[in-house]
Image (spheres, rainbow, N blue to C red):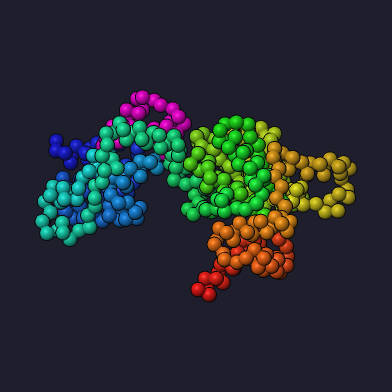
Amino acid sequence: MNKISLIYYRVRSIGIFKQTADSVCVRALISMLDAAREKDIDWLSAGWGELISALYKDGASSLSDELYSLLKRDENAFSRACAAGERDEALFKAAEREIAAISALSQISAQELLELAGAPSELSSQLVTWECGDALSADSGAIAEKLSEYYRKNGCGVYSQYNAFIWQDKRLVPVETPDTITFADLKGYRSQRKMLIDNTLAFLGGRPCNNVLLYGDRGTGKSSSVHALLNEFSADGLRMIELSKADVEDFHLISSAIAKVPLKFIVFIDDLSFSQDNDSFARLKAALEGGLAAKPSNMLIYATTNRRHLIKETFESRQGDELHINDSVQEELSLSDRFGIVITFINPDRKQFFDILDAMAQDRGLNLSKEELHTLAERWSLQKGGRSPRGAKQFIDALCSDSEEEN
């Protein structure tokens, strides 16, 4: 049996890395191997176009780079076991053999296929070809060990590709371009952010931790602080799922989806509050504490709100016709008590506002005296209705825009 036929049958028999084997890239290569063996140049050309399209679509610099990337994204028994820190030697050896087959596939050159197919010599100069590369050129055992370590650190499947997700239509949808905010970008509120970071580090380290409610004035950086956690700790296994308060009833579905994933998940609910006739708060209470189906140990709930008491009340609600009105009021107000940590963000006073402003101006390289900067910022704040970190950022952005126009 010749080399090409041997690789063909080895790749066709892949069962562990089935996602990789079923990819456009590998299917195109198998088609081309078969066409070359049968001396079918028409069939070879069709597979050729599919392969080139797949390589350019993924931005791969070589065939081995593309195949290695596919292996890293593959979710299978081997990658799941590695992600969970488990090692089955029989499974490891089986994965190693399949990796060896894919490695051999990655070293098939365009010229080799054309020669086997008996293509005219002038055809090779007219086609877009590819580099084989060396991403899979190491010993298959070493590659398996490298992949095992990658899965352990980054998870497998979609969780190794993406850090942020949105719960939409009862499924997790990856976020292609998540917020890039970092803690270095956020000014002020150091003690509040330290509480948030410390709790998150405890969560990642498997130590006792709490669900967190970030409460306070709008524009103070509550949501941005949560987003910054992901950029700070995604490499440590943190993932984030944004959940609309309208979809709180799906908590059990999210729990089931991630319970066995060997990563840590923050379920983030922004701008949390409920109207009186909305019973979703009861479902959220159960998710936070007290539900029959326990919240998985790899999940925490972080939420932001502008309201300390999460149920919107009216005087009428306190004077309703229910006999035990106090019990009902306490029931409605108890949701916030289910968060073990409540972190308060209030608008800064004048000095704190100027400190935030000065730090932002320094980051952006603005050449204004503090006196001039503060005078202009105070005028801006009066127009905007108050001082806030968001207002400070908007003011700095406006100054930078004006400065760029002048230049």
The residue depicted at 23 percent of the width and 39 percent of the height is 104
Q: In the image, is 144 to the left or to the right of 31?
A: right
First to last magenta residue range: 75-101
The residue depicted at 42 percent of the width and 32 percent of the height is 82
Question: Is 87 part of what is drawn in magenta?
Answer: yes
Q: Nearer the viewer, residue 128 or 376?
A: 376
> Horizontal and vertical percent for residue 125?
16, 59
Question: Is 96 part of what is drawn in magenta?
Answer: yes
Q: In the image, is 183 to the left or to the right of 36?
A: right
> Horizontal and vertical percent for residue 17?
35, 37
Q: Nearer the viewer, residue 338 or 198?
A: 198
Quadrant in which the N terminus appears: top left
Q: In the image, is 360 to the left or to the right of 160?
A: right
Q: Is residue 249 visible?
A: no
Locate residue 156: give its quadrant: top left
> Horizontal and vertical percent for residue 101?
26, 37
Q: Is residue 135 above or below residue 370?
A: above
